[in-house]
Image (cartoon, rainbow, N blue to C red):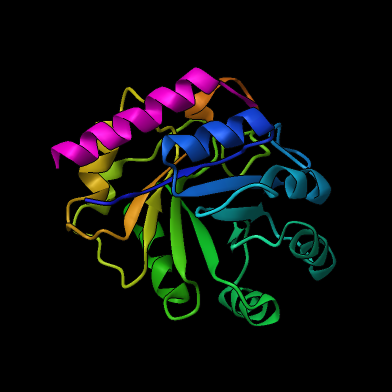
Amino acid sequence: MNSLVKICGLSTPESVRTAQCGGATHLGFIFFPKSPRNVSPQQAARLVQDVADIKTVAVTVNADNQFLNEITEAMNPDILQLHGAESSKRVAEIKQRYQRPVMKALAIREASDLDRIANYEGIADMFLLDAKPPEGSQLPGGNGVSFDWSLIAGLHSRLPILLSGGIDQSNLNQALDYVQQDQNDLIGIDVSSGVESSPGVKDILKIEKFLAACHQRKNKD
């Protein structure tokens, strides 16, 4: 099975090369000043200048058009990930304005949170299901916490879905068990803090081992 694997929160040439060489399908770059993984549009442009045959993702949080203009003009991402409280109307506006796929992130804590998927189907191109932030956190993602993955058992969507939140090498196989249950090859996982040595600092060895484990699982399946 060919699951999607997104390494998110990249901010150095070394981590980008490692993710690319290790076989990640998507590279995520965070544009959110409160995040320890935040990069500027210009930094991201430099980081992706030699990237080929892999999808680049610009992760934003309730960004206005001016900021989205800066990001798209500088780095020309393949996908825009909207990780804030963007309405379905706003998602549609962004998709039309920037003429590229949009991934909508949804924060999940209980089964009813999954009902919001229906609001964006036919508008967004992909979904990312992340855990709701713990109390007091100013970050919508990258908090290293998981939601109850059993909530997605039997979940059906016409769109690709990435599972995120607290995934690392120790629970990778469990995460893949959930995203692969329908044998849909358009679903996968997103990892950020799970391949870091400290918040915002990607660990090259952890990235290598994580991606190697992904490929080992793929070969078994």
Q: Is residue 43 visible?
A: yes
Residue visible at 46% across and 32% down?
145
Secondary structure mainly formed by the magenta segment: helix
Whether residue 115 appears in magenta in the rendering, the answer is: no
Q: Quadrant of the C terminus?
A: top left
Q: Please state if 192 lies on the left or on the right of 149 as rendered.
A: right
Is residue 168 among what the camera can see? no
Would residue 141 appear left or right of 191 to someone viewing this image?
right
Task: Identify the residue shown where x is 51% and y is 40%.
Answer: 20
- Magenta highlight on residue 208: yes
Which residue range is magenta in the image? 201-221
Of residues 133 and 125, the one nearer the viewer is 125
Task: Give the answer, above or below, for where 74 lies relative to 87.
Answer: above
Task: State the image coordinates of residue 38 (x, y, percent, origin top left).
Answer: 73, 39
Whole-percent x and y of residue 134?
54, 35
- Quarter of the image for residue 5 reads top left
Residue 184 image point, x, y percent:
22, 60
Q: Position of residue 80 (x, y in %)?
A: 61, 62
User: Residue at position x 38%, y 40% from top?
Assistant: 147
- Where 41 falls versus 141 (above or below)? below
Question: Against 173, is 154 above or below?
Answer: below
What residue is at 31 percent from the left and 50 percent from the top?
Answer: 3
On screen, 47 above or below 210?
below
Nearer-the-camera pick, 66 or 74: 74
Q: Closer to the camera, 53 or 28? A: 53
